[in-house]
Amino acid sequence: GAVVSQHPSWVICKSGTSVKIECRSLDFQATTMFWYRQFPKQSLMLMATSNEGSKATYEQGVEKDKFLINHASLTLSTLTVTSAHPEDSSFYICSAEKTVSSYNEQFFGPGTRLTVL
Amino acid sequence: LAKTTQPISMDSYEGQEVNITCSHNNIATNDYITWYQQFPSQGPRFIIQGYKTKVTNEVASLFIPADRKSSTLSLPRVSLSDTAVYYCLVLPRDDKIIFGKGTRLHILP
């Protein structure tokens, strides 16, 4: 199998606080994970590529100091939204890469709904 | 990254066959065509992938003409639970996934 989980599934926080979201590959090891953000009625937007044991690679326009990514093990990547503001309210989705039949396939987590008050 | 164009939305009725066409005129030789499905407040789910001709699995069929400049996702006998957004992606295997706007499919009773 290839199951990816996220925790929490939803979170509400006050403006100015930091929130950590976890992404786990449950039955496989993932050197590479990805983080996406999705606003209502819009498509997923790739934020960054998370690499185990090295720094994340951020897409253009994504603030690396605002969205801290840590990929400390082969089954866990975390996204910390620092000093969250209402405009950071969104659906955050991660995916983990697994080698399947000699190529890499991405498996997506169920998402985390963040609401910043 | 090959640009894709697909309808913004489609309506259909339960029991019908639904075909969603995606245009990708500048598809590259090493690009594969992949379709994902996303229900509200859930992560995307892989549906089907193909390179040329026809691919079929238990969920859908994917038709790709010889020039590969378009592809059609076919969902047989849809039900209300097939209401979702369907994304057509054209990229090499192993590439990070960049999503387009997708097609919002609404199945009516």
Image: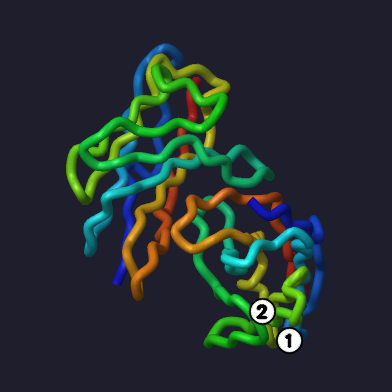
Instruction: Kindly check if marks 1 and 2 are in contact, taking CB atoms under 8 A apart as contact.
Output: yes
Locate residue A15, reporting x and y percent. Answer: 45, 15
Q: Is residue B34 visible?
A: no
**What is the quadrant of residue B56 in the picture?**
bottom right
Mark 2 falls on what kind of element? loop
Q: Is residue B64 left or right of residue A46?
A: right
What residue sits 33% from the left and 41% below the top? A8
Distance between the alpha carbons at the discs numbered 1 and 2: 6 Å
Q: Which residue is mark 1?
A: B15
Q: Residues within 10 Å of mark 1 (few under 14, many from 20)?
A: some
Q: Nearer the viewer, residue A53 or A44?
A: A53
Looking at the picture, does residue B67 appear above or below residue A4? below
**Which residue is at a point 35% across and 33% down the rendered structure image?**
A56
Q: Which residue is mark 2?
A: B79
Instruction: Count the marks.
Output: 2
| Residue at the (40%, 51%) spot, across then down | A95
Disc 1 sits on a residue from what chain? B
Q: Residue A86: x, y in percent?
A: 54, 20
Residue drawn at (27%, 50%), measured in percent from left and top?
A: A31
Residue farthest to the front? B29
Q: Earlier in the sequence, mark 1 or mark 2?
A: 1
